[in-house]
Image (spheres, rainbow, N blue to C red):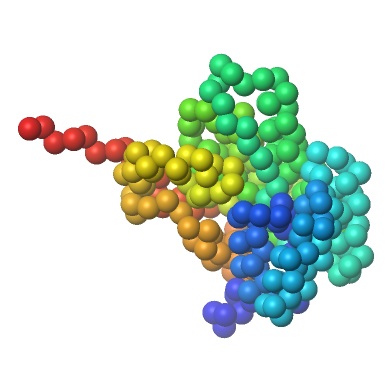
Amino acid sequence: MANALFDLTGHVAIVTGTSRGLGQYFARALASAGADLVITSRDPETLEPFADEIAQLGRRAVPLALDVCDPKSIEAMTAAAEQAYGKIDILVNNAGMNIRKPALEVLWDDWNKILDTNLRGSFFVAQAVAKRMVARNYGRIINIGSVTSVAGYAGLGPYGASRGGVRQLTMSLADDWGPHGITVNCLAPGWFKTNQNKVMYEDKEWVAYLTDRIPVKRPGQPNDLDSAVVFLAAESSRYITGQTLLVDGGISTGAVRALPKKA
């Protein structure tokens, strides 16, 4: 009974942005739970090794091209996914990017690129997939946010705005599509080492500062997200929608670095 709540056998999941990073971990977790996959990148040829890896898990992975800033690309990917499997059950709206700069140095084009990718792209991918889900009266949409969806950090102005927008968008879409059997939730990772931020983890003093602020006293490891993405994709979360699930070791509680003891 308990296992059935997390069993994705027979389900089809699109995971966007799977050429590297957390997108691949989300896809592995869903495949391990039984789902077949559509994996995406702007260059689908880069996905072939990962598709082979998923095949070793006994699941199918169809690599498709996707540029979330191009509406024609979004529609083409979604149509091809539906043609490949006949249905789409799950969307993990993961594709995203960042340009890390102090606020005084952010350019107009920096803002547009970040917001167009992370926020506008998330909306229109969700819209294209939801059109297919509505016809079947079933769907699980998981928008990927961030701890910056609920907290502000220096140097992350446009990125934080985009992720805060994803959180608000999630609530709106949950209200729109709930009557059609579709749940929409936001999975918000805390501080995980990725290609976007790996340079920060080379600063040992910064890592120590970060670790002090996290109640569990360590940054996240990618597999810490496995159970959360499966939970939101499966029957286990059938009565949960419009919510933001923070997987952040507790840093969003507002923990601060301990003051040094006085001599």
Residue 85 in sight in this render: yes
* Residue under the image location 14 percent in, 36 percent down: 261
- To which quarter of the image does residue 180 belong? bottom right
Nearer to the camera, 206 or 161: 206
Q: Residue furthest front?
A: 202
- To which quarter of the image does residue 179 belong? bottom right
| 243 sits to left or right of 211 | right
Q: Locate the C terminus and report the quarter of the image it occupies.
A: top left
Pinpoint residue 193: horizontal percent, then vertical percent: 51, 49
Pinpoint residue 115: horizontal percent, then vertical percent: 70, 32
Q: Locate the N terminus and report the quarter of the image it occupies.
A: bottom right
* Residue under the image location 71 percent in, 52 percent down: 17
Residue 238 in sight in this render: no
| 156 sits to left or right of 165 | left
Image vertical order of residue 205 relative to residue 140, above or below? above
Image vertical order of residue 224 relative to residue 43, above or below? below
* Residue under the image location 69 percent in, 71 percent down: 53
Nearer to the camera, 164 or 62: 62
Q: Residue furthest bottom?
A: 1
Q: How many marks?
A: 0
* Residue under the image location 55 percent in, 39 percent down: 149
Image vertical order of residue 261 relative to residue 91, above or below? above
Q: Residue furthest left?
A: 263
Pinpoint residue 62: horizontal percent, then vertical percent: 82, 66
Pinpoint residue 125: horizontal percent, then vertical percent: 79, 47
Image vertical order of residue 78 relative to residue 171, above or below? below
